[in-house]
Image (cartoon, helix red, strand yellow):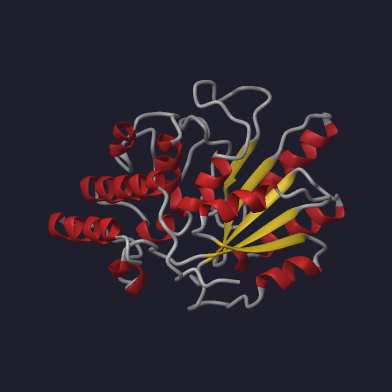
Amino acid sequence: MDSPHMTVPMDPLCKTIRTEILKISNKCGHGHIPTSFSIIEMMTAVYQTMKHDPKNPNWPDRDMFVLSKGHASLGFYCTLAGHGYFPFSDVYSFGAFDSTFGCHPDRTKVPGAEASTGSLGHGIGLAVGMALGARINGTSRQVYTLIGDGESNEGSVWEAAMVASHQQLANLTILYDNNNSQGRCLPIPNPGERFASFGCDVVEVNGHDLPELIKALKKPHNTVRVVVCNTVKGYGAHTLSDKVYEWHRRAPKADELDMLIGELNAGNF
């Protein structure tokens, strides 16, 4: 398994999404930038794999994606924008009073958001229910959910994994963001082994290698698939990854914005 620190050419769309995250955060003063940066390739891989129609977000035959770690909402919105759901310019109202784009996703407001998330440990349970409902209804719908390693300190994550495995939900894929964000709480070493012990089909990848992620998402499986994605919080900008706690909720000022975009463009992460 290669380290996520290895040099992987950043996909141009992923770089654009990260750049927009920085600009929007600078304008609005909000945003969990490092946690958003760690999952951009993961979400991009999902939207380049699953069945969906940005022009018809409620298409009945669509697959579904649930961002369980809802604190990364700015990254989610910019990924949706990058895949045609709405212009990036719409997201510049992020966090403002009465904005469509709140600091946690609202499924009644944001095109493409299938669930209102943010309470940690809840989104994965919703995704399990969606996958079970799709199977009961006899549809071919696939359901994807992205969970955080810190979020996985919640017992509801493992309860949901146990139900998904017991029901052998082969139409469910869980992406686990292994960015070591839980270092100050309860560490979860060897998450792949833990999910496997619950009966899940586990594959481990470099979470910043887009082709590797897409290959893992397309690999057939007979029960719930867990993709453990080894990532770096703040990936793409050394200032963010080296000072993740300082930048946990900070928005960049004008000079910091230029510096962070320069680090992104340098491409030497």
Residue 192 figure quarter: bottom right
Residue 256 position, x and y percent, is 18, 60
Q: Give 48 or 85, whichever is nearer the viewer.
A: 48
Residue drawn at (45%, 34%), measured in percent from left and top?
83
Residue at 84% of width from left, 29% of height from top? 138
For residue 262, side relative to residue 95 (left or right): left
Q: In the rendering, at what x and y percent does residue 36 appear?
A: 42, 55
Please provide percent x and percent y for residue 264.
Answer: 29, 58
- Residue 165, position in %: x, y? 82, 56
Compared to residue 151, the image places residue 40 above or below, namely above
The residue positioned 38% from the left and 37% from the top of the image is: 101
* Residue name at image x 73 percent, y 66 percent: 195
Total numbered circles: 0
Q: Residue furthest left?
A: 255
In the visual, does 41 lie left or right of 145? left
Q: Is residue 211 above or below residue 152?
A: above
> In the rendered view of the protein, which quadrant contains the N terminus?
bottom right
Quadrant (top left/top right/bottom left/bottom right) for the C terminus: bottom left
Q: Looking at the rendering, which quadrant does residue 187 occupy?
A: bottom right
